Amino acid sequence: MTALTDTRIAALRADPALSLLYRSLEVYYGDPERDARMDAFYSRFVGTGDLVFDIGSHVGDHIGSFRRLGARVVAVEPQPLCLRALKAIYADDDQVTLVEAACGAVPGRTRLHVNSANPTVSSASPDFVRAAEGAGGWEGQVWDGDIEVPVVTVDALIEAYGVPAFAKIDVEGFEDEVLAGLSRPLPALSFEFTTIARAVADRCLDRLTALGFDGFDVALGDDKSMTFQRWVSADEMAAHLRDLPHEANSGDVYCVSRDSWTSTSSPGRAVRWR
């Protein structure tokens, strides 16, 4: 982080109005080794001058990584508290565009189920909230509020800002709805999966295959380390996710469309399989 960012994070941590984000700010900022691992990992997908969509930005640690790699970022986040933090952290960065909305299948509005004690798991999916009730590893999680938020599609983001080299989708069980609002392949994207909502991942893989994505790998938890170290088929990925123990909890599936990468990525860039 820069000294200015350090100062802004410190100010946010001292703001009583943002007390519910203190833990997130503590976890996701101020760890140079974690930042370096993230940058090294995402450098296979993101380079200087690329456009990245960060869908479900929370407090913006991924924005920071994408910016350190030289990318322009369109960050999509519906939670007012998180947006307040993002606006403070990236206030003077003209390469970061904040979109105050959820992402979904069709434009309009939706209900966001807010976990005020742990905003990172707020979700627009009532099925996800129900699946978490009584599930191991989700004890104590309470979605204690609902707010109505606008919805934008990935297609609309592309029309407004251009085709991203990479899109990160992390929206707590609403990933299939986000992908339903995308009608073309991208060079690469990731979507979060959870073991309490495996059917969502199956629908995501079906949608991505229909769109022309043809290579998949997965990183478990917050560990930026690929499991297969090669791109596997959607069928192999689906079988792998179904066989994971419940305790695996969550992770991110990385997906590439090699034809799209070749035609749209920066000159000289090639998808790196490791």
Image: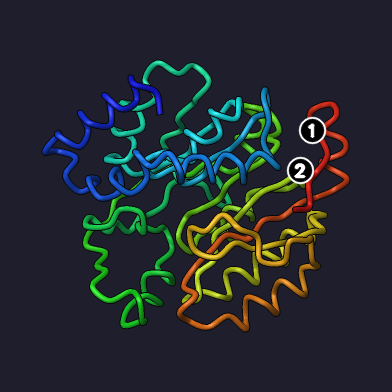
Amino acid at circle 2: Pro
- Looking at the picture, tell me which residue is in the foreground, 151 or 246: 246
Q: Is residue 81 above or below residue 226?
A: above
How many other residues sit within 10 Å of disc 1, few (<14), some (14-19) or many (≥20)? many
Left or right: 63, with 208 as reference point = left
Relative depth, front residue between 2 and 263: 2
- Quarter assignment of residue 114: bottom left
Under mark 1, the amino acid is Ser
| Percent coordinates x, y for residue 83 in the rendering | 34, 35
Q: Which residue is found at the position 43% from the left and 70% from the top?
A: 128
Instruction: Give the residue displayed 39% in from the left and 23% down from the top.
Output: 2
On screen, residue 236 above or below 38? below
Indicate the position of residue 169 as horizontal and vertical percent values: 55, 50
Give the residue at the far front of this rendering: 33
Provide residue 73's location: percent of width, then percent of height: 55, 30
Question: Is 151 rendered above or below residue 200?
Answer: above
Question: Which residue: 27% across, 40% down?
Answer: 81
The numbered mark at residue 149 is none
Image mark for residue 187: 2
At a point 26% along the width and 24% down the height, the residue shown is 7
The mark nearer the N terminus, 2 or 1, is 2
Q: CA distance from mark 2 to mark 1?
A: 7 Å
Q: Give the camera-side residue of 207 and 116.
A: 116
Quadrant where the image shows the N terminus:
top left
Residue 28 falls left or right of residue 163: left
The residue under label 1 is: 265
Whether residues under marks 2 and 1 lie with C-beta atoms below 8 angstroms apart, the answer is yes
Mark 2: few/some/many CA within 10 Å (<14, 14-19, 20+): many
Determine whether the residue tagged by mark 1 lies in a helix, strand or loop.
loop
Determine which quarter of the picture holds residue 17.
top left
User: Whole-percent x and y of residue 210?
Assistant: 79, 60
